[in-house]
Amino acid sequence: MCRARRLPRRASAQNGGVTASTEPSTGLVLLRKLTWWGLVGCLVGMVVILASEVRTDPAPAAAGMVLAVALTVCAVSGRLFAVPVLGTPPPPAVVTAVAATGAGAILLYAQRVHSGGFPWALPLAAVLAAVHAGAGWPGRVVWPAGTALAFGASLAGSWSIEPAAAADALTDAGITVLCAAALYAQVWMSTVAERLEQARRAERTTAITDERQRFAAELHDIQGHNLQVIALKSELAERLADIDPARAVAQMREVQVLARRALGDTRELVRGYRAVSLETEIANAARVLEAAGIESTISRPDGLPLLPPTVGNLLGLVARECTTNVLRHSTARRCDIVLIAEAGTLVLRFVNDAPLEPTGPAGGLAGLRDRLTAAGGCLRSTRTADSFTVQASLPMPAAR
């Protein structure tokens, strides 16, 4: 027996009559977690590396001061990194300035003990990347200021302005900028993914709104006049009922004719709205899936004969419903659309990955299953750990 399963919906919010998903996709949530814990791991690793460097310092007080400052810098940098990744408020500008000064002091100290460069530039690199990511200051200010601070601290720690000292200072500044850029790249990728997700969600909402407005406009154009005439003739019949019953009856007969005509127009409108082409729906499915960031492939046989409207419409509805399920009820990253003509049967198969656990009663697929069964076909759905497959089949018309 063919049995359809319905995948659960994500949380949604109503906005102007349009239902749009407001919950980020699973991939985006995973990227956030990877970005955050990757940054935390970098900051912790920075402290560990510095601790191994200062362990051999002959002055324990100085070494302890360096580690204390490094921990403070990491705490401020982590708070700033959390702004774009987790959405927390940034620390005050004074705290950020103090952390940057302390990071520069570490680089100055490293030059004094003749141990400049890596890893002493890491605290300043962390502050530089974090300020650009979470403080809201423009990059054209942050990066030149951070580079100048690194160069000045390194040059001041060397107690010399000789070419060799300047070269070392430039090297330290370059290491700072490169390390800061590597840290900032993690946040930048997460931010780009967020913006792409918002754009895709907005595109879906816009498409739904446009389609509803189009249908509403067609319904108004078709039925507005009919209903207005029906209302006027009904009022006229009411006034004529006592003074001229024969004319009142004639008016009501005209109202019946108009009502039947309006009903026929409504049926034609709905029939035209529901009528779908299989080829059009498959092409639309690929376009919509691509806009949603889902990779799709289409496989169809060559020389497919002209399909009767009933077959094309039914399979087109299956393609539309499967596309909706992939977009709204799954976390798919890939979808394969296959059309097969074999043994007198036309088969349409949708396969998407990353299925969710089914919940709730069956909906659109169950209704389509009944319609295909009545037409001599069948609809089956199969769920595994890493895929969800919907297969619809209908008798293949004989070639003419």
Image (spheres, helix red, strand yellow):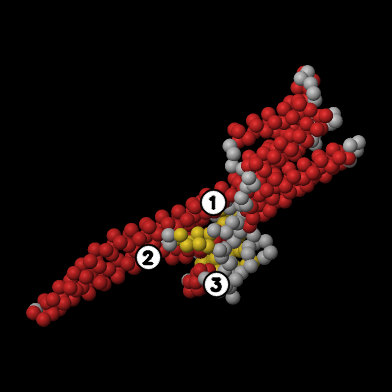
195 or 127, which is in the foreground? 127
Mark linked to residue 362: 3
Q: Nearer the viewer, mark 2 or mark 3?
A: 3
Residue drawn at x 48%, y 74% is: 374
Residue drawn at x 58%, y 67% is: 8
Mark linked to residue 198: 1
Q: Which residue is mark 2?
A: 271
Q: Check disc 2 and report its element: helix, strand or loop.
A: helix
111 with respect to 356 (left or right):
right
Give how far across and how far down residue 299 sits, in percent: 57, 54
Which corner quadrant of the image does residue 53 belong to? Answer: top right
300 or 388, which is in the foreground? 388
Q: CA distance from mark 1 to mark 3?
A: 29 Å
* Label 1–label 3 contact, CB within 8 A: no
**Which of pointers 2 and 3 lies earlier in the amino acid sequence?**
2
38 or 172, which is in the foreground? 172
Rendered view: 376 above or below 167: below
**Which of pointers 1 and 2 lies earlier in the amino acid sequence?**
1
Q: Check disc 3 and report its element: helix, strand or loop.
A: loop
User: Quarter holding the N terminus?
Assistant: bottom right
Which corner quadrant of the image does residue 274 belong to? Answer: bottom left
Residue drawn at x 60%, y 71% is: 359
- Do we see residue 364 in this rendering? yes
Is the residue marked by circle 2 packed among few (<14), some (14-19), or many (20+) residues within 10 Å?
few
Rendered view: 200 above or below 350: above
Is the residue marked by circle 3 packed among few (<14), some (14-19), or many (20+) residues within 10 Å?
some
Q: CA distance from mark 1 to mark 2?
A: 34 Å
Residue drawn at x 67%, y 33% is: 146
270 with respect to 338 (left or right):
left
